[in-house]
Amino acid sequence: MSGGGNKVRKIERILRSISPSNYDTLITHGGVQSNHCRVVALKAAEVGKKCILYLHGEDEALRRPSGNLLIMALAGAEIHVVPHKTLWDAFNCGVEECRKAGMRPFVVPGGGHCVAGAEAYVEAMNELGNELKQSDWIPDVIIHASGTGATQAGLAAGLDVLSWPTRLIGISVGRPSPRGKAAVEEMYHEVRDTLRMPGQPREIEFRDEWLCGGYEQASDDVLACIRHVAETEGMILDPTYTGKAFLGLIDLVNKGEIPRGKRVLFWHTGGLMNLLSCRYFGT
Ligand SMILES: Cc1ncc(COP(=O)(O)O)c(C=O)c1O
């Protein structure tokens, strides 16, 4: 799907859990540069459904849309930009209005944060297991950007299915640790319960040392990390998600928390549109 990223698997899996005849509209919410809202808009266009988005942000954003917002608009989504503090009320009213108008909206949870969204990452881990079957390479550590927590919860449950002893480290992109970790744990246990997984649950490792000022904020270290990885690996990171995760990875290696020689898998979750719409690079 255009722009890619971790929200693609989530929407694919969420829509597999419901019959297309049960809804005519996908409705959801997020920020004006939400990857989740972009994939919902594209998916709705692909399957011939209407899409309604409630986005928090500046009103002017729509005048010269860029990045994810531009794609949402191109995909024909009905877009409502509202202030952050009124988002929830506006969204609930929007859903109600749809129903009153005789439409059949399917409410996609913000960020694709639900058990089905997390299950997409149990499946993804299984794919990784199949890919690596032919080799004797199993990661000692997997690192990735963690936000609302469904990706990490699914990856953790996926590791349980594979019975790999791999250490999974989620690098927070905005939430401080107690709250972020609790959100991952809650979803992880829900997924394990839903899939009736036997055995002991694992400890969730959610690290918040590279918040760089908070969600959608980036420090000079993150920007330097993005440049370094682009120049030395030809791999593109972004300032909101993967740049922070990779900065965390480098720090953990430098501090010896990940000993040299360990097999490390960086799970790239996307973020290209966040890079292309960001205000940090340039003169
Ligand atoms: C590019 C990217 N990476 C990582 C994440 C974090 O995923 P999750 O919210 O499932 O923790 C997001 C969520 O918005 C994302 O868009």
Image (cartoon, helix red, strand yellow):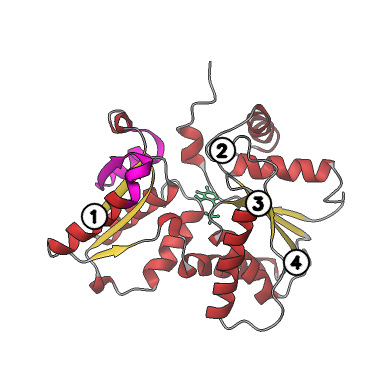
Mark 3, secondary structure of its residue: helix
First reached walking from the N terminus: tag 3 or tag 1: 1
From the image, state whether disc 4 or disc 1 is nearer to you.
1
Q: Are marks 2 and 3 in contact (CB under 8 Å)?
A: no
Give the CA distance from mark 3 to mark 1: 33 Å
Give the CA distance from mark 2 to mark 3: 21 Å
Q: Residue at x 44, y 47 (%)?
A: 35
- Whether residue 205 sits left or right of residue 65 in the image: it is right
The residue where tag 3 is placed is 177
Residue situated in front as seen by the camera: 164 or 104:
104
Residue 236 in view (yes/no): yes
Q: Give the label on residue 135, or none.
A: 4
Q: Are marks 4 and 3 in contact (CB under 8 Å)?
A: no
Q: Are marks 2 and 1 in contact (CB under 8 Å)?
A: no
Mark 4, secondary structure of its residue: loop
Mark 1, secondary structure of its residue: helix
First reached walking from the N terminus: tag 2 or tag 3: 3
The residue where tag 1 is placed is 93
Q: Residue at x 72, y 66 (%)?
A: 203
Q: Residue at x 14, y 63 (%)?
A: 100
Magenta segment range?
65-88
